Each structure stands twice: as structure tokens, then as C-alpha cells.
Image (cartoon, rainbow, N blue to C red):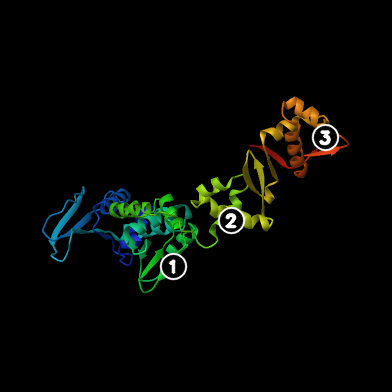
Amino acid sequence: MAECAGLWIAEGDGKTKNEITFTNNCEALVKLFYNTISNIFPHGKFRLYVYTPDGKYGMKLRNCVIRVYTDTRASKPYYILRYANVKDVIKWRKIVSEILLQKKYYPDILRGFFAGEGNIKTGMHANRMIRIAQKNQIKIIDSILHHLSISYRFSISERSYVISGIWNWEKFYKYRLHDLHPDKKLKFMKTWKSYKEIHYPNNFIRNNILDKLSKPMTSRQLAQKFERTQATLQEILGKLKKEGKITNYKSRSNDYWVSKDSDLIVISDRKSQILKILEKPCTVAMIAKKLDVNWKAVRRRLNEMERLGLARQHNYLWERVPIEKEVIVI
């Protein structure tokens, strides 16, 4: 019903008080609208008016009177579905009004509206846009786009909502806003798959990377997540480190980056082994003997752990330092 409410607002005759009307040239949408409305009003008498250039059409609806007319101007058959009943029109308007007030139906409403008035525009320089044709802005569409965090601009000259940026295309895919009209769904998917690189707004990665660094991540992992080169991410990470917003820990020759607010320390397996040994104070030689490694390697790890605040030396003995931060072994 929410999808059909969106279809009706977009394509239907919302001003007529005596009948419910829906006009479209897509058989799938006409069938959807008819099946939904006829289930609400099972005893209603529906009429379908078919306008076709050559007298041919494929639409068949149960318990619906069909009238066929020739329209030589039409490139393909189009249909006008009518249901005349004043009481039921009032009931339908009330249903639509109640649906529009509930935010949980926003994706469904927009899905129907886009099926009726939406289109995909592609142009030169890999220009890709989602458009929703309208003479003027509509309050409910503004509210839905804002609620779904879909950015847009309204073009008076194009008489439409204009939506661009792959983050908005992802929202359309996530909420299935494109898949009610079969032809528009096909074009949407073909265009979306043609994106070779995500074009983020200015400073998008910089503004969103801190949320990703609540747990340790390498520059390579971040590059894969944001679909950018590792060099680009390393440059951004370097700037954020200078600003004191993130820090990095070395483990197994890799740099792991975390937010300064995360209260995490990343260490290697070797450092973790040394920490367990330091539950009792030990000399460098004692640790090296237990691990069966060179004492110089142990000394380097202990110096690194001292800088991290995990260990300290007293006379010739090293001991573990209790800390409040969480230690993660990678």
C-alpha cells in the first residue's frame, strides 16, 4: 500500500474526489496498483482504458472492464485505471494520509514515487544522475530524502530533483528505491555498475575515517574500505597523526592505526610473550633464555614497550606496568 501511495502521488489524479485514477504505460505498475486497490475494495467496479497505436496490448486484469482506444500518437500502449466510488475514495485518501505520516514507510513511498516520476540520466564525462521529475518541490519528498540522508538539489530549469554521488546511489540500492519499475531498475543497475571509482565529497574520507579507527586498521585495509590507493590513505593518516587525532603501533612490520580516543594499545605476539614473563621481574638475559632468542632483540622490544608504558626497568630488572588501556595482540 505504501508503494502504491507513492505511485498514486506521482502518477495518479490526487485532485479528483469522485474516483481513484492511475495512469502509466508500465504494465507491471498498473497490475501492482490494481491488485493492491482491488484487495482493499474487493467489491469495487474497476475500469481500465487502454490507448494503443495499433490496437495491440498485453494487459489482462480479472474482474475489470477493459475499454480499448486507438491513439496513433502513442509509441506504446498506455493505461488509465479508474475506480469510481466516493466513499471508497475518502477511505483511500485517509489510508494514504496515514501512510505518509509514518517514517517507517518512507522507503516504500519513495520507491513508488520514483517508479512513477523517476529517471536515470547519463552524459559526458561519466556524468550520472538520478532525477525525480516534479514542477515544484514536494514537502513529503523533501522529508523522505532528508530522513534517508540522501543529498539532492532541486533544479527549477530541469523541473526535477537531481541526485548524484555514489553514496546516494548506494542509498537507493540499499532501500531498493529503484526496483519497482523494471526498465528503470535495469538502467539503474547498468549505470551504477559503470562507476569505476567512488567520487567522494571534499574531505569525506578525512571526516569519516575516525569512526573506522575505533579498532586497529592498517592503511591497506582502509584503502580497500574507501576504495582509494594506499598512498592516499597514508597521506591522510599522516596529517591526522600530526594533529594528534590518531596514533599508530607497529606489529609484525605493519603499522596499525587507531583513534586517540579508543584507549587501545596494539602489540605483537613477541611483546605479549614478554609481558607474561614480566609478571615477575626479570633481567634481559633471563627473558632471552626463556624465549630462546638473542638478548639484543629482547632489549629492543623492551625499549619499545617502555615507550608504550607497558614495562619499566628498575636497576637491572624489568617489570610489567599496570595500565588501564586495553592491550590488543595482533
Report which quarter residue 115 is drawn in.
bottom left
Q: Is residue 86 visible?
A: yes
Residue 286 vertical position relative to residue 202 in the rendered view, above or below: above
Query: For the point 63% across and 45% down, which residue is it?
Result: 255
Q: Element at badge 2?
A: helix
Q: Nearer the viewer, mark 1 or mark 2?
A: 2
Type of the residue with mark 3? Trp
Please report contact status of discs 1 and 2: CB closer than 8 Å, yes or no: no
The quadrant in which the C terminus is found is top right
Q: Which mark is residue 176?
A: none
Q: In the shown orientation, is residue 6 left or right of residue 255? A: left
Crowding around mark 1 (Cα neighbors within 10 Å: few <14, some 14 to 19, many 20+) is few
**Whole-percent x and y of residue 199?**
46, 58
Q: Mark 1 or mark 2: which comes first in sequence? A: 1
Query: For the point 62% across and 41% down, which residue is it?
Result: 253
Q: In the shown orientation, is residue 146 left or right of residue 60? A: right
Q: Which mark is residue 235?
A: 2
Q: Is residue 87 visible?
A: no
The residue that mark 1 highlights is 153
Q: Nearer the viewer, mark 3 or mark 1?
A: 3
Residue 68 vertical position relative to residue 214 in the rendered view, above or below: below
**Whole-percent x and y of residue 99?**
42, 55
Q: CA distance from mark 2 to mark 3?
A: 37 Å
Q: Element at badge 3?
A: strand
Q: CA distance from mark 3 to mark 1?
A: 64 Å
Q: In the shown orientation, is residue 305 left or right of residue 237? A: right
The residue that mark 3 highlights is 318
Query: For the point 32% across and 67% down, which residue is it?
Result: 15
